[in-house]
Every structure is written in C-alpha cells, then in structure tokens.
Amino acid sequence: MSEWLALVAVVMVGLSGLPGLLLHRESNMGQHIATSMNLVASILGIWSALRGLLVGAGSGISLPLAIPGGEISIVVDPLSAAFLLPIFLVSGLSAVFGEEYWKQSERPRNGRRLRVFYGLLTAGLALLVVSRNGVCFLIAWEFMALSCFFAMTTDDDQKEVREAGWIYFASTHLSTLILFAFFPIY
C-alpha cells in the first residue's frame, strides 16, 4: 500500500504544474491549482513515508519498460521513507511559500515554468529514493537533474543565474557518467 501511495504522490506532484499551462498567463488560478495538487501529493507522500517507517517495506511495485532489462521497480522501506518524509514535507511547504514569493500575476513570463519544473523536480527526487533497480534509479536521476536545472534557471535574464545553471548541469551529468560506471558492478 505504501508503494501505491508513493506512486500516486509522485504522479500527482509531477503533473501539478501542467494545469497552469492551460490558463491565462496573468491568472493566479494555475498557481493555486499547482499548490493544491502539490499539497495533496505531499500529504499522500508523507502518509506513504509514515507507513513505510511504521510498517516496513511492502511487496513493492514493478512496472515493465520497453527497454532491455528495464522496469520501474519501487519499494518504500524504512530507509527510503526517511528520505521521502522531508522531500514531501519541504515540497508542500515550499509550494505554499511560493504562493506569495513567486506570484504568477507578478511574473507572468516565467511563473508557470517554475511550477512545472518544481513539480517534476519533486517527483524525480521522490522516485529516486524509492527506486529498486539501476534503470529506474538512472531515469529518476536524470529526471531530477534536468527538472532542477530548468527550475533553477527560471530567472534566466540574470547572467549569474545562467552561469550557476550551467555549472549545475555539467556537475550532475558528470555525476551521471560516474553512476553509469558503478552500475555494472552492482
């Protein structure tokens, strides 16, 4: 049950920014929908984490992928639950804080982009800690790395933001190459 709650939370938070793309740029409605979806997903994710901490690992979920040796395999055990708890807690609280800090009506050019990639970042982080095989872990890692790059470079008019984003991008992809080197050993 914990795994299904976590999977629903991952999908919901990953999709939280999409409704805002369909609404008017200056409207705060998309922001409110994204925040609401993020909060519901955070509650489900925290519930999943608490179940994982108190009950222990469930049977897990395995969904096949159309690549050799590929499947999405997730388990919420006490260790992954200890990481899921702060991921979803901080994500939900940050979404509420973002309602005032990065208002859509004040930043119509990039507010929607930030919310889309923030939700995808949270989904990638959560999937990363519950992954139970190399393919799923690497997919979640890349998802997390790319969405974080796009979220952190939202305010890309500033030279410092662009430079920091490219340093981050290079660092995470160097880390990805190092991870590729370790997975044949595992």
Image (spheres, grey):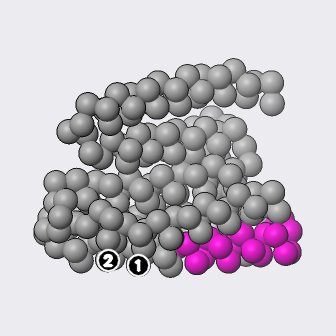
Q: Amino acid at mark 1?
A: Ser
**Mark 2 residue type:** His
Helix, strand or loop status at disc 2: helix
Image quadrant assignment for residue 105: bottom left
Residue 4 horizontal/vertical position (percent): 65, 71
Residue at the spot x=80%, y=24% of the render?
A: 185
- Residue for point 49% across, 76% down: 39
Q: Is residue 70 visible?
A: no
Residue drawn at the location 34% of the way across and 71% of the way down: 99
- Residue 67 sits inside the magenta stretch: no
Whether residue 51 is situated above or below residue 72 in the rendered picture: below
Image quadrant where one finds the C terminus: top right
Q: Residue at x 16, y 60 (%)?
A: 108
What is the CA distance from the residue labelled 2 to the residue labelled 1?
Answer: 6 Å
For the stretch drawn in magenta, the main secondary structure is: helix
Q: Residues within 10 Å of mark 1 (few under 14, many from 20)?
A: some
Q: Are marks 2 and 1 in contact (CB under 8 Å)?
A: yes
Q: Position of residue 64 (x, y in %)?
A: 62, 51
Say whether residue 167 is left or right of residue 99.
Answer: right
47 lies above or below 158 = below
* Magenta-colored stretch includes residue 47: yes
Q: Quadrant of the rendered structure where residue 180 is?
A: top right
* Residue 143: percent from left, percent from top: 49, 44
Q: Quadrant of the N terminus?
A: bottom right
| Residue at which label 2 appears | 32
Q: Is residue 185 left or right of residue 169?
A: right
Q: Which residues are magenta?
A: 41-58
Q: Which residue is mark 1?
A: 36
Q: Secondary structure at mark 1?
A: helix
